[in-house]
Image (spheres, rainbow, N blue to C red):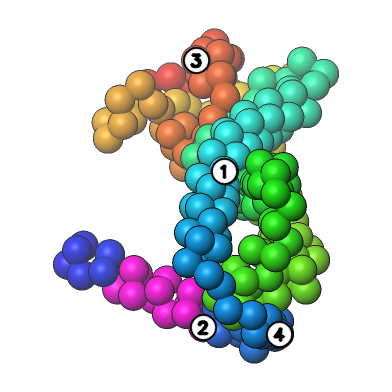
Amino acid sequence: MILLKFLLEIVVFLLLFVIFRQAVIKSFPVKSIGMPLSDQSRVALQRFRNRYILLFILFSTLFTAVVWWLLFRLLVGFQTRNGALVLIVDNMALLLPSLIIGLLLGTFIGRWANHKLQRDGLSFFFEGYTDELEGFNWLRLSKWLVAVSLVFALFLIIGQFHYRLKIKEGQLYIKTSVFEPEKSFTLNRVSIHPDSNSRNNFVIYTPADTLYTNNFGGDKKAFVQAIKKAGRTE
């Protein structure tokens, strides 16, 4: 059953990709260059495309890791100001917006680096052929790509900013959605227990919520100790 669900998700993603690609091709059509390539130029074009793919993967991986680390540090730093103890959204949840930004940076910086490495000045000519092979005009698409990617990444980051647990002045503050108000409970109304299903994690019980620390990131040890010290432990 799990395998069937996984295969179904793969099919859905592939269909969405095909639909998206066809929409891009129809929305950003490219003009045909109409100039045949010699065998030597075809080899050079293939090298140009392969080098870009390598640079794209390299820079995208690098920037995804850097943005992932920066997002985590910025969220933690902003939330823990004024001496509060905070658990933010789990680190893995920050991977998707980091990946979006990393791919975007990898795309543009990879193209820039590929231009610099093409010392014969034929990079623009090869890019024109690449657009023709792929079926869409990259220069027309790029502005939309930046706008949509940044809006989507910002939407995810805003949602993740509003997913947190905070302890300050003897109160536990809970915020798990942009659209829901922050809840607060005095720590003597909170109990905490080891999570039998997740090693080194805990379950936090409040009068309104059951929370699992494995869904959050940050200094869990200090957070748990603060609840144990001021709250109820069983």
**Tag nearer the camera, 4 or 2:** 4
**Secondary element at tag 3:** helix
> Is residue 88 shown left or right of residue 178?
left
**Tag nearer the camera, 4 or 3:** 4
Q: Residues within 10 Å of mark 4 (few under 14, many from 20)?
A: few
**Secondary element at tag 2:** helix
Q: Residues within 10 Å of mark 3 (few under 14, many from 20)?
A: few
Q: In this figure, which residue is indicated by the disc labeled 2?
A: 19
Rounded to the nearest angstrom, the CA distance separating label 4 from label 2 is 22 Å
In the image, 29 versus 23, the foreground residue is 29
Q: In this figure, which residue is indicated by the disc labeled 4?
A: 31
Rounded to the nearest angstrom, the CA distance separating label 2 from label 3 is 46 Å
Q: Residue at x 27, y 31 (%)?
A: 196
Location of the N terminus by quadrant is bottom left
Quarter-wise, where is residue 68 in the image?
top right
Callout 1 touching callout 4 (CB < 8 Å): no
At label 3, the amino acid type is Lys
Upstream in sequence: badge 1 or badge 3: 1
**Secondary element at tag 4:** loop
At label 1, the amino acid type is Leu
Quarter-wise, where is residue 179 in the image?
bottom right
**Tag nearer the camera, 1 or 3:** 1
Callout 4 touching callout 2 (CB < 8 Å): no
Residue 166 visible in rendering: no
At label 4, the amino acid type is Lys
Q: In this figure, which residue is indicated by the disc labeled 3?
A: 221
- Asked if residue 17 lies in the magenta stretch, the reply is yes
Q: In this figure, which residue is indicated by the disc labeled 1?
A: 55
